[in-house]
């Protein structure tokens, strides 16, 4: 009988101890899970600002959240954007323009001031994950090459002083041209004239755990090697084994150009005995429009490349040389930078126009972790900005008449009558026709006065036809993003408080119960 009671008491003791350990470890395990998630490969976007109608910082961040974009790269330290990204869970790499390298590279105090002003002031509310020092300096501004490493080291020391060097990685983006003979990848090597800069830089990256940042464009590889590199290889299109590129030295098969370019970087590092630095693709993409000398800069090719790129990264299949390591990538770029100088393609790398309407339709359904728009699924048709009222009225009349759009909701007293203007009424009628036609090609044109958008145009009690088909989820998601995010943060903080309080109670109870249990053990 005594043994039975003793066993029962011992089991109670173990149960009490197990519950205590479980609750105490919960916050740490949650943190580890978040860190593991941060290490997963991702697709981000570059945000250039040579855009005539760039959204305000708050509108930009709202758009990023709506599109489920979780990683962005800025070319400078735009404080208004950095501030607007606070408490959004969007990770950001901030940049230092080439013209600031001299000041930062020649003065530790200037570097420390820069870090305090642009990083410490915002982290961790804004999740700054990296600093890109300069851009393609070794090839575009070779006279500034000696400044790169001193600038990086000064900034790194400032991060160490703020105990942020483990959370924020620092590196510098390179053009693909620093690597010579990139195919076959096994024969690739860094340009030896740059060795005095590249070797110590790689040693730093290895020591600091930072990535080798590379701007890699299969588009340019194809354009410079037409007849040698098939277009399908550049666009990630499925290939028969006979069309795959084969490295004769390793017998590795390459189904796409980007993987070959990444492995060329790995082989180049290996030739310098560096094997622990990962490649981060800071720029890649495909232009959707070009001049007469750029016939392959088309919307179809841009859609194919970027859609397949996104799928490829989230497949997490790595490269032929490193199937265990999938490089994260930043698509160049979020918006068409219409203010950039010729050629035409320079202004047409964006996924979207500056007014946030899609430049072309991506096919990314089923991925679920990047872009709210399988832009082929959740799209709407609205009137374009800047169209005169007379032209819009004619298109509206056709949509509600011969086009047989359902225009009942824009009649006086109905939910979409306000605002009572031609553009608003035309947008509703256009979307009604577009949805009725099953979003068929050409159904959102109306003689050039309509445009497809991924942003839900519904407002107030006015629900657009495209939203009715998806139960208004897009509209609700757009309006409640901030609220949901804040609610999630509040729940997280509340959970932490509850866990902390429960731990305290548990420790007190455990401490109070321990003498009692010891006495019981003694008695039995």
Image (cartoon, rainbow, N blue to C red):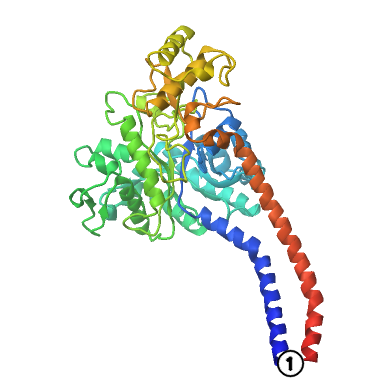
Q: Is residue 5 above or below residue 245?
A: below
Total labels drawn: 1
- Compared across the picture, whether 21 is left or right of 362 comes to right
Residue at 23 percent of width and 42 percent of height: 229
Vertical arrangement, residue 61 with respect to residue 369, above or below: above
Q: Against 10, is 283 above or below? A: above
Residue 330 placement (x, y as % from top left): 44, 42
State left or right for residue 246 relative to residue 450.
left
Left or right of residue 228: residue 56: right
Q: Which residue matches tag 1?
A: 2
Residue 118 shows in the view = no
Image check: 257 left or right of 414? Answer: left
Q: Nearer the viewer, residue 100 or 512?
A: 512
Q: Nearer the viewer, residue 408 or 293?
A: 408
**Quadrant location, the C terminus:** bottom right
Q: Residues within 10 Å of mark 1 (few under 14, many from 20)?
A: few
369 up-or-down from 294: above or below: below
Q: Residue at x 62, y 49 (%)?
A: 158
Q: Position of residue 492 (x, y in %)?
A: 66, 52
Q: Residue at x 72, y 87 (%)?
A: 5
Which residue reaches farthest top? 390
Residue 178 found in image quarter: top left
Please name the residue shown 35% across and 27% down the image. Answer: 440
Report x, y in % for residue 177: 34, 42
Helix, strand or loop status at disc 1:
helix
Can residue 445 be seen in this snapshot?
Answer: yes
């Amino acid at each position: 009988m005594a043994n039975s009671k003793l066993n029962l008491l011992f089991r109670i003791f173990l149960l009490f101890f197990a519950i205590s350990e479980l609750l105490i470890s919960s916050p740490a395990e949650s943190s580890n899970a978040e860190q593991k998630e941060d290490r997963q490969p991702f697709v981000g976007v570059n945000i250039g600002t040579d855009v005539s109608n760039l959204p305000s910082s708050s509108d930009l961040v709202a758009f990023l959240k709506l599109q489920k974009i979780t990683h962005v790269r800025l070319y400078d330290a735009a404080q208004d954007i950095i501030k607007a990204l606070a408490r959004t869970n969007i990770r950001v790499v901030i940049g230092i323009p080439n013209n600031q390298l001299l000041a930062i590279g020649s003065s530790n105090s200037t570097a420390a001031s820069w870090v305090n002003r642009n990083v410490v002031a915002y982290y961790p509310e804004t999740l700054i994950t990296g600093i890109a020092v300069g851009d393609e300096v070794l090839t575009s501004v070779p006279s500034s090459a000696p400044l790169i490493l001193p600038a990086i080291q000064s900034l790194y020391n400032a991060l160490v002083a703020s105990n942020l060097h483990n959370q924020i990685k620092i590196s510098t983006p390179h053009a693909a041209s620093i690597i010579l003979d990139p195919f076959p990848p096994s024969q690739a090597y860094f340009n030896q004239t740059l060795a005095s800069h590249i070797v110590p830089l790689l040693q730093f990256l290895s020591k600091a755990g930072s990535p080798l940042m590379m701007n890699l464009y299969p588009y340019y590889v194809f354009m410079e090697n037409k007849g040698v590199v098939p277009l399908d290889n550049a666009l990630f299109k499925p290939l028969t084994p006979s069309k795959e590129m084969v490295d004769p030295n390793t017998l590795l098969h390459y189904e796409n150009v980007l993987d070959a370019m990444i492995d060329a970087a790995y082989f180049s590092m290996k030739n310098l005995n560096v094997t622990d630095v990962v490649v981060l693709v800071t720029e890649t993409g495909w232009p959707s429009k070009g001049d007469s000398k750029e016939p392959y800069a088309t919307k179809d090719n841009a859609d194919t490349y970027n859609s397949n790129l996104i799928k490829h990264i989230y497949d997490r299949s790595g490269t032929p040389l490193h199937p265990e390591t999938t490089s994260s990538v930043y698509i160049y770029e979020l918006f068409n930078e219409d203010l950039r100088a010729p050629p035409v393609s320079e202004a047409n790398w964006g996924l979207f126009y500056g007014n946030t309407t899609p430049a072309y339709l991506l096919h990314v359904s089923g991925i679920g972790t990047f872009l709210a728009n399988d832009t082929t699924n959740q799209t709407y048709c609205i009137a374009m900005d800047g169209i005169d009222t007379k032209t819009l009225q004619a298109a509206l009349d056709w949509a509600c008449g011969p086009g047989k759009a359902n225009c009942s909701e824009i009649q006086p007293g109905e939910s979409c009558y306000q605002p009572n203007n031609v553009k608003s009424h035309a947008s509703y009628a256009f979307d009604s026709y577009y949805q009725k036609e099953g979003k068929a090609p050409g159904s959102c044109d109306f003689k050039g006065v309509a445009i497809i958008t991924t942003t839900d145009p519904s407002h107030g009690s006015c629900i657009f036809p495209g939203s009715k088909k998806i139960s208004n989820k897009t509209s609700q998601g757009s309006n409640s993003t901030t609220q949901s995010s804040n609610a999630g943060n509040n729940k997280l903080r509340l959970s932490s408080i509850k866990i902390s309080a429960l731990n305290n109670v548990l420790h007190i109870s455990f401490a109070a119960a321990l003498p009692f249990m010891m006495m019981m053990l003694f008695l039995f």
